Image (cartoon, rainbow, N blue to C red):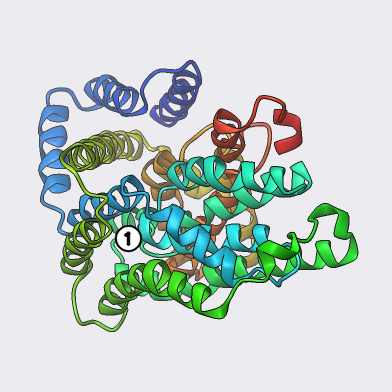
Amino acid sequence: MTHANIALMMVGIFIATILLGFPIWATLMAMGFFFGYYAMGDRIFVLLTQNTFSILSNDVLTAVPLFLFMGYIVERANILDRLFFSIQLAARRVPGSMAVATLLTCAFFATATGIVGAVVTLMGLLAFPAMLKAGYDTKLAAGVVCAGGTLGILIPPSILLIVYAATAGLSVVQLYAGAFLPGFLLAGLYVLYVVGRVVIDPSLAPDLPAEESKIPFAKVAMALLTSFFPLAFLILSVLGAIVFGLATPTEAASVGALGSVVLAAGYRALNLQRLKEAVYLTARTTAMVTYLFVGSWTFASVFAYLGGQELVEHTIGAMHLSRVEFLLLSQFIIFLLGWPLEWTEIIIIFIPIFLPLLKTFGVDPLVFGILVALNIQTSFNTPPMAMSAYYLKGVAPPHVRLTQIF
């Protein structure tokens, strides 16, 4: 058996192992170590040490725990409740107003957290029961929460884009600037779709009662002033500083983390317990990403050493694909990987296989990164492994079936 065949066997065993439920980071490190020892001998210890040092000294990844902390503080401080209420009041005269408010809240909250599970779960607890109570179609309400919740994958400050930037050696600033238009365009198209569906079939989303729609303008303005604008100012300040080059992503994330604490304290929603929870969740998620990076870089290095990367490049080169055909093939593979795998594994493990091919086909890595982010977002909503649907099912009323959410 050639080394290239062993590299392919290595990937196959890895996928089979994680499908059995073993931890991803541990599987990566174990596979990388054992196959690396077979191929490289004692040098695998040097490689593992170097990869660990490179990851822990990467300045780009410093922004990850800071943005995570910012998101978890906003989540734990119940700021989402105020945000949803104020947007719902402002959109009360729009067809399907509660669904529109849900989408806008998801898009806006995604810019503060970038965590799909958190957004879908919180909106599933807050907005989904409210829409069902108001007589909204179950499938429409579920689709709105699941689709809106995944916008955090694409809309900055997406953690995915930071990880992709570190993997591909790209500028986080350029990725953020490139993701704004696709992210908010997609959110806008979701809103247009919902409004169009409700205009065609009003039974999907009944109008609000007269007493709920006739609200004084002063009350709406006050709700927006006290809940929407403070969070909007914080987010726009952080992202604006990054995009316009006033601060590095790490510096802006530091200000955002501090601002989220000040905002939560201003709402009198900050206490020691919530602060401890935010710190714990931040540390746990950051540790997971770090271990994934160490394991995946070791895995990828051994895979390339065995000739796996060369085999992939030779196979794709022999297919004589055009640039568009290569993009379609690569995105289709990533789409399929999105069913059993989380985005972290896809970005850290499989994207490095495609990166060397981008120059061959004349594809800009920035464009490829935005396509990947958009693609992985759809995989969150694609049955049978639609993670957003499972997040929502976990908090939905018992009578809502998983097939309805699908």
Q: Nearer the viewer, residue 289 or 39?
A: 289
Q: Residue at x 37, y 27 (%)?
A: 24
Q: Nearer the viewer, residue 51 or 173?
A: 173
Which corner quadrant of the image does residue 11 belong to? Answer: top left
Could you tell me residue 376's position as x and y percent?
Answer: 54, 49
Q: Residue furthest top?
A: 20
Secondary element type, mark 1 = helix
Q: Residue at x 58, y 76 (%)?
A: 216
The residue that label 1 is drawn on is 165
Could you tell me residue 343's position as x and y percent?
Answer: 45, 44
Could you tell me residue 154's position as x and y percent?
Answer: 48, 60
Q: Residue at x 21, y 27 (%)?
A: 40
Q: Quadrant of the C terminus?
A: top right
233 displayed left or right of 97: left
Could you tell me residue 10's position as x and y percent?
Answer: 41, 25
Rendered view: 97 above or below 149: below
Q: Quadrant of the N terminus?
A: top left
Residue 406 in view: no
Q: Nearer the viewer, residue 44 or 75?
A: 75
How crowded pointer 1 is (Cα within 10 Å; few <14, some 14-19, many 20+) is rated as many
Q: Residue at x 61, y 71 (%)?
A: 215
Q: Nearer the viewer, residue 39 or 300?
A: 300
